[in-house]
Amino acid sequence: MNILAFGASNSKKSINQKLAFYAATQVNGATISLIDLNDYEMPIYSEDREKEFGIPELATRFYNKIAEADLIVVSFAEYNSSYTAAYKNLLDWTSRVGMQIFQQKQVLMLATSPGAGGAKKVLSSAQSSASSFSANLIGAISLPSFYDNFDLETNTVTSDSFNTQLIDSFKSNDIEPVNLSKSQQ
């Protein structure tokens, strides 16, 4: 299984990038492509820019990355109860390549923050718009209080609740988690 994973943030120390990668590593036998939104930085979208310059090649590359994946794992950072500007801009440009951005691929949506809210507001927004962008949503899980629930030395989530939800999302969509052997299925 080919997994495209990323944090929907342009922070170089993104906790959402760490969470997306962790979740992707929990799929048995997966090949993971971890991307950094900084590699997809484009001018702020506007119709005027699109008419004058066309669609940036980076938007097409991102769209093609999604096309190559079997599963997309995205973890949303929450800025002022919404998407980060970096993610929203990438979404806007990529929608000009094809409105069905997620191309009916399986998508696992995550979110985390240092606080107890766990970025649930942006996760809820992402969930509600998932079908508009042709995402086959297999789960949406928030990890509150990131630094209390993530071991930075081992890069693992220590929350049993989160891990149970993650494994259940995989199993209910015929994705084999790493902690399951063939005999346990």
Image (spheres, rainbow, N blue to C red):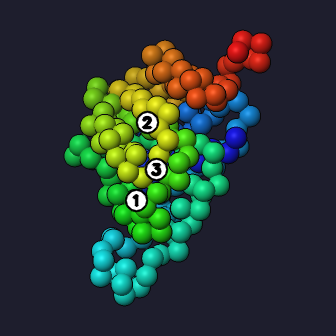
Question: As shown in the figure, which amino acid type bears the numbered disc 3?
Answer: Ser
Asked whether, in this view, residue 64 is left or right of residue 49, the answer is: right
Residue 169 visible somewhere in the drawing: yes
Which residue is most to the right?
183
Q: How far apart are marks 1 and 3 (CA)?
A: 13 Å
Question: As shown in the figure, which amino acid type bears the numbered disc 1?
Answer: Leu
Instruction: Give the secondary structure at mark 3.
Output: loop
The quadrant of the picture occupied by the N terminus is: top right
Instruction: Please name the residue shown 51% across and 17% down the image.
Output: 164
Q: Quick check: 168 above or below 25?
A: above
Say which residue label 1 marks.
91
Foreground of the two, 147 or 45: 45
Say which residue label 3 marks.
134
Counting residues from the start of the chain, the first of labels 1 and 2 encountered is 1
Which residue is most to the top?
184
Quarter of image, res 32: top right
Q: Quick check: 79 above or below 41?
A: above
Q: Position of residue 145 (x, y in %)?
A: 35, 26
Asked whether, in this view, residue 32 is left or right of residue 151, the answer is: right
Q: Where is residue 159 in the image (x, y as percent from the top left)?
A: 46, 18
Q: Position of residue 49 (x, y in %)?
A: 34, 81
Question: As shown in the figure, which amino acid type bears the numbered disc 2?
Answer: Leu
Counting residues from the start of the chain, the first of labels 3 and 2 encountered is 2
Which residue is most to the left?
80
Q: Where is residue 70 in the image (x, y as percent from the top left)?
A: 63, 45
Counting residues from the start of the chain, the first of labels 1 and 3 encountered is 1
Instruction: Give the secondary structure at mark 2.
Output: strand
Say which residue label 2 marks.
110
Instruction: Give the secondary structure at mark 1.
Output: helix
